[in-house]
Amino acid sequence: MKHRTRIAVASGVITLAIVGVGAVVVAASIDDDGGDTPIVGPDLARATQAALAHTGQGRVTSTEVGDEDSYYEVEVTLDDGSQVDVQLDRSFHVVATMADDESNDESIDGDDNGAGE
């Protein structure tokens, strides 16, 4: 193989390797918690009210629009320190409530309706 051809092939291989590594880095950076968009404005007030009315206690510690389980997700820290994720639809109706435990997301009430699966 001529010297110029070898350089061209080597450049192509290096370029492909860089593109491949870049794709892996981008894919790895897209995770469940990486790109959360918080609820804001009047929607935040409505989501907070709906979540706290459902739990009957606690304080809102995190929110997300476009959650993988529902349209809105409101994380509530209960008075005992445990956390639950209250899943809401676009109309702020509760569709599921799940214990916020990274190792075990399971419904803690009868409102699951399959939204968390």
Image (tube, rainbow, N blue to C red):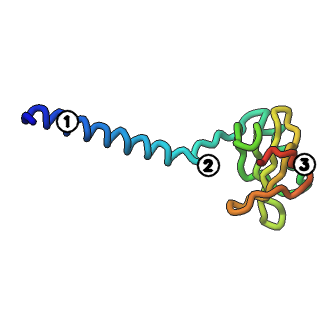
Q: Position of residue 80 (x, y in %)?
A: 82, 67
> In the rendered view of the protein, which quadrant contains the N terminus?
top left
Residue that numbered label 1 is attached to: 9
Mark 1 residue type:
Val
Q: Residue at x 79, y 33 (%)?
A: 42
Mark 3 residue type:
Asp
Front residue (pair 109, 14): 14
Q: Which mark is residue 61?
A: none
Front residue (pair 41, 71): 71
Q: Residue at x 71, y 36 (%)?
A: 40
Quarter of image, res 56 = bottom right
Q: Which mark is residue 33?
A: 2
Q: CA distance from mark 3 to mark 1?
A: 59 Å
Q: Residue at x 78, y 52 (%)?
A: 85
**Furthest-left residue in this view:** 3
Q: Position of residue 43 (x, y in %)?
A: 78, 34
Mark 2 residue type:
Asp
Q: Secondary structure at mark 1?
A: helix
Residue that numbered label 3 is attached to: 111
Mark closer to the chain start, 1 or 2: 1
Q: Is residue 20 left or right of residue 45?
A: left
Q: Residue at x 79, y 58 (%)?
A: 106
Q: Secondary structure at mark 2?
A: loop
Mark closer to the chain start, 3 or 1: 1
Mark 3 vs mark 1: in front? 1
Mark 2 vs mark 3: in front? 3
Mark 1: few, some, or many residues within 10 Å (few <14, many ≥20)? few
